[in-house]
Amino acid sequence: MKSLPQKIIFFALATLMGSAAVVLLLNECPAEAAGKENCGCHPHKAEKTFIHQPVKDGDCNLCHKPSGEKHPKVKAEAFLLTDSGKGGLCAECHERKDTKKYVHSPVAAGDCTDCHDPHQSENKYQLKESASELCYQCHDKNKFVRTFPHKPIAEGKCLGCHDPHQSDHKYMLKEEGVNLCMTCHDKSEFSGKSIHSPVASGSCDSCHATHGTGIHHLLKQVAPAEMYQSFNKENFALCFACHSDTLADSWRTDLETNFRNGMYNLHYLHVNKSHKGRSCKVCHDPHVAAQPRLISDKVAGFGRWRIPIRYTKTDVGGTCVVGCHKPKSYDRINPIENP
């Protein structure tokens, strides 16, 4: 039916016999529906990379049925969908995607074709756009532009974390809480002798923004990135969101911290300096550590050298053997005189 006379015969039959002739011809010649001229005069629907299987097989009548009107004399509504209910047609072949607790609004509304082309596409799953660009047709892209974006966001892989149809978890997440994080991050890196309480409770989002922020390491609030800096409470906003912001205010204390020699505040000694004040991460790992009090065994030093720390905790204090100063001990009850 590719030559001009065959087309004329096709149209003449359709005019004389009505839409039934079209269906008859399609049923007799199913391959013709996937030819260069799909259904005779309709735009070809089988040229792109990803083609809906019924289109590929030429089975137009799996989704379209004649209404009884004469075609092509009557163009609109000469053919109807086999199921006029939204999403109902897709569910005739595809498994339902609206059975879980949280359902994506287009799916809940039965608007499958908001995202999928029912015939063909250059995108996998017959998506109308690439995955992230499709998301941004409804979701504001500007809300996801960050100086430090989460890697899946930067790569346009929204579906790394979210299910596009339905989920048992809020925000259409594929897993809940820390289980989602651990689908990419190595769980073994978050187990040790001492574990930061947000990590232990699986509350990664207490400190990190899941899409991205303007702060390094996806942090929600400011925390020192440098080893040394002058002391300013604003620079420790993330830490002080949970820990006392008066921790290093005074050199003398008996309440603010257990890190003291007698009443001499050793946090104050290390942190509260106008020049070369130590940041929290010089001694503490924000996630886990093999030593008590989240004390790291090695920290960034100078050049390639990583400063070793050996910390021994006692009931009333402890001892630090480190690469940046002589061994030091402290005792909250009986102050130790260090050289």
Image: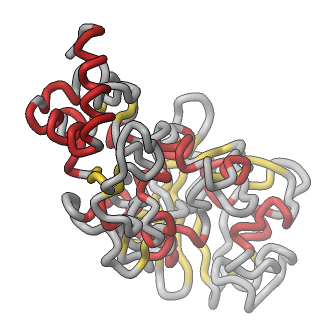
Task: Tell me the residue at 65%/77% (across/down).
Answer: 259
**Quarter of the rendering containing residue 173:** bottom left
Residue 73: horizontal and vertical position, in percent?
42, 39
Task: Tell me the residue at 77%/78% (across/down).
Answer: 247
Report whether 16 appears left or right of 325.
Answer: left
Residue 128: horizontal and vertical position, in percent?
47, 40
Residue 334: horizontal and vertical position, in percent?
63, 87
Task: Tell me the residue at 73%/63% (across/down).
Answer: 221
Front-lying residue, 328 or 112: 112
Residue 281 lies, with reference to residue 48, above or below; the image says: below
Report whether 61 appears left or right of 195.
Answer: left
The image quadrant where one finds the C terminus is bottom right
**Quarter of the rendering containing residue 70:** top left
Residue 67 in view, yes or no: yes
Residue that sits furthest to the right in the current view: 274
Residue 200: horizontal and vertical position, in percent?
42, 76
Residue that sits furthest to the left in the current view: 28
| Colour mapping | secondary structure
Front-lying residue, 81 or 305: 81
Task: Tell me the residue at 24%/30% (across/down).
Answer: 13
The image quadrant where one finds the N terminus is top left
**Quarter of the rendering containing residue 133:** top right
Residue 36 lies, with reference to residue 62, above or below; the image says: above
Residue 192 in view, yes or no: no
